[in-house]
Image (cartoon, rainbow, N blue to C red):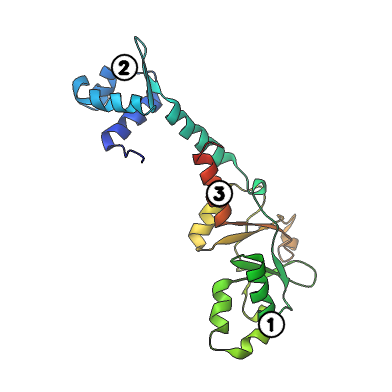
């Protein structure tokens, strides 16, 4: 079970991160306390490998802290194109029944809907389909285009954007996935958006887990 650090121990890590190597006395001075008061905190942080203690040198970040720094640095530079998967696409002429079947066969939470030319037309989610089919036997024959969220109200992301940007959009817009689209070369192409992939919350969770495990 992970040990939860106290606020003072977190403050110690912040001081060491910014000023390493640093003596115990100087750490105590910045915390406006004395070395004996923080002795047990320093001992615990060293035991947990958050800090390293070297005689006549002082305290510096330990292996556990460095791993966290490396993981954060990796996360900040990761791009969507490294983790995007193939899009699950239906034409806008497909029926609600087609969408329901595809949703479960592909085991996804949403489907990307494209027009006859293959450009983004909209997106339909499991929730959208559930709303329209409950208590409506005729709904299965409806065109999925009547149920989907239409472009340009669909939130998208490009392959060159960061994983952090993808996570931010999913949280801000409360969606489970984003179509990955090729960035239009000009404003004239804004209506013809080519879908080249998708990225999901499940993918994001896997990325964070791999970073946490140091993979």
Give coordinates of residue 4: x percent, y percent: 32, 40
> Which callout, 2 or 1, points at the residue further toward the start of the chain?
2
- Marks 3 and 2, how far apart at CA: 39 Å
Discs 3/1, front = 3
Q: For mark 3, what is the residue?
A: 206
From the viewer's side, name the closer residue of 184 and 79.
79
Crowding near pointer 1: few (<14 within 10 Å), some, many (20+)? some
Disc 3 vs disc 2: which is toward the camera? 3
10 is higher (above) or lower (below) than 189? above
Is 18 drawn above or below residue 22 in the view shown?
below
Q: Position of residue 159 (x, y in %)?
A: 67, 50
Q: What whole-number distance in Å separates the C-alpha atoms at marks 2 and 1?
A: 70 Å
- Residue 143 badge: 1
Q: Position of residue 117 (x, y in %)?
A: 80, 69
Which residue is at a point 50% across and 38% down the rendered structure image? 72
At 26% from the left and 17% from the top, the residue drawn is 25
Residue 151 visible from this viewpoint: no
Question: Badge 2 is on which residue?
Answer: 23
Q: Is residue 108 visible?
A: yes
Residue 65 appears at what percent x and percent y? 43, 30
Q: Residues within 10 Å of mark 3 (few under 14, many from 20)?
A: few
């Amino acid at each position: 079970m992970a040990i939860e650090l106290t606020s003072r121990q977190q403050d110690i890590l912040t001081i060491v991160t910014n000023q390493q190597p640093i003596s115990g006395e100087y750490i105590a001075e910045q915390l406006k306390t004395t070395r004996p008061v923080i002795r047990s905190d320093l001992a615990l942080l060293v035991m947990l490998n958050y800090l390293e203690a070297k005689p006549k040198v002082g305290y510096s970040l330990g292996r556990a802290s460095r791993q966290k720094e490396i993981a954060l640095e990796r996360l900040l530079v990761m791009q969507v194109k490294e983790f995007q998967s193939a899009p699950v696409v239906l034409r806008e002429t497909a029926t609600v029944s087609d969408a329901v079947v595809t949703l479960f066969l592909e085991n996804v939470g949403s489907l990307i809907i494209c027009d006859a030319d293959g450009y983004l037309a909209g997106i339909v989610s499991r929730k959208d389909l559930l709303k329209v089919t409950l208590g409506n036997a005729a709904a299965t024959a409806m065109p999925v285009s009547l149920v989907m969220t239409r472009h340009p109200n669909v939130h998208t992301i490009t392959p060159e954007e960061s994983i952090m940007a993808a996570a931010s959009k999913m949280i801000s817009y409360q969606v489970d996935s984003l179509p990955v689209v090729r960035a239009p070369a000009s404003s004239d192409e804004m209506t013809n958006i080519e879908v080249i992939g998708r990225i999901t919350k499940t993918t994001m969770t896997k990325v964070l887990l791999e970073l946490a495990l140091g993979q």
